[in-house]
């Protein structure tokens, strides 16, 4: 039996952690650049947190991978809790950029040339994190460029990560499997106010679409055809990361989030939207920081620093298919009542 | 003689402040929307802080307006202190966006339609703040659009603010007046390592330009012609918000910030760069928040919300002429020594 | 029908808000103290947010006041959401102290004497907030002192607030009404590993107490008698803000938070613990700020500033009866299984 | 010549950093506790930052150790800049506590017992940091207890750190050496409004003491005798970490901070006061977090967790001798004018 640790220092492997800072400028024949230590430690701190974020995201993926989530298990709650933690970490990482900004451009110059070709874009963990969340190779800004600076072994790892089922795909599958609209008996008490039919939509969606039409401002008529394409109600549907069936479930969850069974699913969707915002803010502050540090000079990795980062910040919204659903919400007081059978289905057992 | 205030509540006019929240949805015939109170209070809080920021910026402008700043007065220190305060406020305002994000899109919808055509873009104080810092009408994203939603009286105020000397122009003037390079006697001990001359540049700049050439990576040769245009050393100079003369002083300050007389000027430049970053982060988070709240729907002010904000966030870097100077820095150990006459000039009196 | 607002400025009553700053030092015969504006605006901003927090807390109290909460309504979720918002606001308010700290002691002195006897302790809204959450008069540090500086009308309001049912009492009632342990049929499948009985405890608690005993370190034997007193299992029980019956429910919720029906109750408990921490951090930073600003001098309200604040920070943990329950948790893998009847009761209906 | 690093991963020794997490619960025969990874990584991140803070503080100590600081060198500016960085780091570390708080007490219990006797109090780096700043053994809460849990080798390091000249002592020496009050010729233009003399105080202090008397409220008369003791003007002076001579210089700097030569010294004093506040807030949040996590149970290091931390938070204000000087400030408009000789001495050379 493994003995439990005697000392905090051993338990945390602090010898190993605190012996891993080797500023190049401290070695002969260079002149020690005071701020190189900060540069190393802040990046190491970021990488420690990337490891933790990946660890949490992988554990959420394990949960979402199951063919059926048991509503009565704490699994969904656990997934939400862990993604909230990831968001809490991201907020600290955004804040941590303040520390980097205490390094002035002149201080950076003191050791900057020693770093080439190593570069700040080479965090394979961050790239794996993006991939595991759902960013696909073909959606990346700069495509192959993004791995060109990595060690071959890490490029390999990123590629492998891109081949695994990611969180977004798994959420798509989970949403597609939701049985809300198929089972007609569940809707037996649902009363439509609108009698005409549009094609053969499920009754709920016929009614909802009708109410959405009424809510749209004149200038927003494009919105309806967009709705039809996203939800699969038109002749041509959009084929994005969320399928029409998944989009329908997700919108339903957003609308009826108050029912017990939809509370955790709603929080899960909210978590990934929040994560997209945090990642985006992080990329944006990173871009601004790089701009302030090196102006329009070429980054240590050979790229034109700011432009690459700006492209990524503008483009890498992983969960944007959820975000766009907010265009299709209607006011709560106009929501159709679901009928008592469906409402019972979404609630607790009071036998 | 005015009596001093008896009570905290009277001193702060809290009756007036706390009686200024009138949610429209709370009035007949509407249904009270719980979150409308938050919407009002957060905007009022933002406006209070905009007032404070304007107050600080105006006081800095008063200082910078003087034909000559007395180095031995605390004025420059005061200007730096107050701009640092503005930055501290901005960081809180960025953070405060977290509170807005506790309002979900469905919660917003409950009262959103009652707000049209009032819109979140209508903060004339923020527009005046941008103008007083140095954002010119012709640099604005969307040009006239940005005031089209304001009350005519406020549009007038914004226009008037745009006609006043702004912080950036005053900083330009202050930098242009710096006597560093003209007085030849100050440079009598300066030793150039480079004997060839480029046109009739001041000796210091001949030398600096020579050293910059040596520091540029092969891929950065464009940098030199950019340098010449910005610093006014070529046949055609760029005419931007910072004139060539001002750019030369600013670069000199960045390079030799360690000398006592340049410490406060360096901090002043740093403050405005930091402010640009904070403003930019604020606009960016605002944009993301709006996107999450209304998707691609039309904003309450009739604009396509996110796109306007994105345009502004990308474009409104007020102090970018300072930021670009970082491209022209060279390593500290390659900096030319200034010679003892100049060094004495930049230091304290030891009589 | 009330017309919807034309302009942002009117909707937000900005004339009223932005016309409420009247620094005393700006009036004859005083010398304008630049930082008095900041002092006023930051306090006004705090008061705006206190109003918002009170508004949210009152709405949660309305929910908790009901004789029975419907598990299938979104009410509990709404209560959690709003308390989370209060916590998000508190975090910003703690951060906002950074702005106050940009005022140096010398800057404060410029107008400090004009404020006497008005004082920063006179926020009746904050006192009402504390009272509505559950802080009782007799638990207050300094007792009557805390209202002695208020306008009589506000003292009255604070006293009235103290007489209303507060959030803590309502949570106590809600927890007491939980039917977990009385209904014997629910526990028909519960298997105790321990056959001896302690008095006539419900079976679950006999078993749990047995397992707790096993988990305690030798040095922690006091813990057991504390447990018995808090949970009402001994001859004498503690009569605190949470009754023994409520403490039992709360501990049960913490232990079995994974079951769907306990998820929102667990989050509610977590929210108030988080709120206590935030309030406490706010008081602490406030105390440090006052100390830095005036040293050991007497506060503008006549108190010895720092000491009063320190007393309050140390003493005013409103929800400490929840916090102490964490001493009685045991490891998850040692938790008794509840049996399938009870588990079904805590889960969703799958008819 | 050492080759510059090819890859980011090698430069940062990421193999070593990312291979240092070994949760005990992941090993046989234990059950893996998901959150143990977080526990390890957050502590490693704290220790990385403690290393960086120590590195910055040591570099400031090197500067302050010099027998005479050259006003015309950038050294004082560098010291201020680096302490500001330390404060920026501390703010992130305080914020980072939010991440720890995503771990619930139940989650901690899953591996808590495996950690005994290792404990969170065993950060020798933090203890060395406190010692290098100026916390003496005899001022520590709990005295020997604080090292009893460390590995002997680390106890030794802490003891050695306590024997070195610390930042506070060096600041004391630097302040004592300031030549402001001795050189009578500097004060030749100083005009006292007050003709009586108190013993043989320097003219400036006679005058200042007179004005302080006038500024004190009736209830503050104790303040004067405190002033005399701290400044060494009475029969018995306090012998604290700042000597009377150093206290006089420090107060003078606070009062006349506007003069160029006092700007950086003022910022230095401000930095250490800010640092004390940040350290104190960190200890306070740590205490609250521990309380929430383990209630009144015994900490993993065997202490009664919260109480130790509370004692330390209340007692360990390292720079309190600076803080108390704020009690002795008077209003700016009552400050004695220094006379032109002294003012020239504090300003720039305009030869």
Image: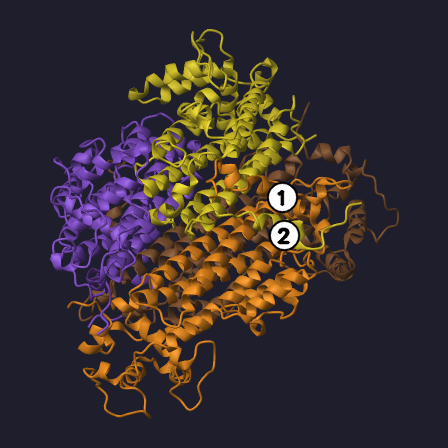
Chain colours: A orange, B brown, C purple, D yellow
Identified at 27% across, 37% down, the residue is: C121
Relative height, residue C8 to residue D211 (above, below) = below
Depth check: give the residue in front, A240 or B232: A240
Residue D335 at x, y percent in the picture: 46, 25
Relative height, residue A339 to residue C68 (above, below) = below
Depth check: give the residue in front, B241 or C207: C207
Dot 1 surroundings within 10 Å: few (below 14), some, or many (20 or more)?
Answer: many
Task: Name the quarter where the C terminus of chain D is drawn.
Answer: top right
Identified at 56% across, 32% down, the residue is: D263
Pinpoint the chain carrying mark 1. Answer: A
Pinpoint the chain carrying mark 2. Answer: A
Q: Which residue is mark 2?
A: A293
Task: Name the quarter where the N terminus of chain D is drawn.
Answer: top right
Q: Is residue C88 left or right of residue C231?
A: right
Residue B61 at x, y percent in the picture: 52, 47
As drawn, the label of residue A20 is 1
């Amino acid at each position: 039996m493994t003995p439990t640790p005697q000392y905090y220092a051993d338990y945390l492997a602090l010898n190993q952690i605190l012996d891993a800072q080797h500023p190049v400028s401290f070695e002969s024949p260079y002149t020690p650049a005071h701020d190189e230590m900060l540069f190393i430690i802040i990046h190491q701190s970021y990488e420690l947190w990337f490891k933790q974020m990946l660890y949490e995201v992988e554990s959420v993926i394990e949960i979402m991978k199951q063919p059926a989530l048991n509503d009565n298990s704490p699994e969904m709650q656990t997934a939400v809790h862990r993604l909230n933690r990831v968001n809490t970490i991201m907020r600290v990482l955004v804040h941590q950029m303040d520390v980097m900004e205490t390094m002035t451009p002149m201080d950076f110059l003191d050791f900057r040339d020693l770093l080439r070709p190593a570069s700040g874009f080479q965090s394979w963990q961050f790239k794996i994190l993006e991939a595991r969340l759902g960013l696909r190779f073909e959606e990346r800004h700069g495509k192959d460029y993004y791995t060109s600076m990595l060690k071959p072994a890490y490029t390999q790892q990123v590629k492998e990560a891109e081949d695994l089922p990611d969180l977004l795909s798994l959420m798509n599958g989970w949403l597609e499997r939701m049985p809300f609209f198929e089972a007609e008996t569940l809707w037996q008490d649902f009363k439509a106010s609108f009698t005409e039919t549009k094609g053969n939509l499920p009754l709920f969606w016929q009614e909802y679409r009708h109410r959405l039409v009424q809510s749209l401002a004149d200038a927003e008529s494009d919105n309806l055809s967009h709705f039809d394409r996203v939800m699969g109600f038109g002749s041509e549907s959009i084929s994005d990361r969320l399928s029409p069936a998944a989009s329908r479930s997700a919108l339903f969850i957003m609308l009826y989030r108050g029912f017990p069974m939809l509370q955790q699913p709603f929080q899960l969707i909210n978590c990934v939207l929040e994560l997209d915002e945090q990642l985006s803010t992080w990329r944006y502050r990173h871009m601004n920081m790089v701009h302030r540090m090196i102006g329009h000079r070429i980054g240590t990795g050979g790229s034109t620093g700011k432009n690459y980062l700006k492209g990524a910040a503008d483009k890498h919204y992983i969960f944007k298919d959820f975000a766009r659903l907010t265009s299709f919400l209607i006011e709560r007081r106009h929501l159709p009542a679901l009928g008592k059978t469906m409402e019972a289905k979404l609630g607790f057992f009071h036998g």
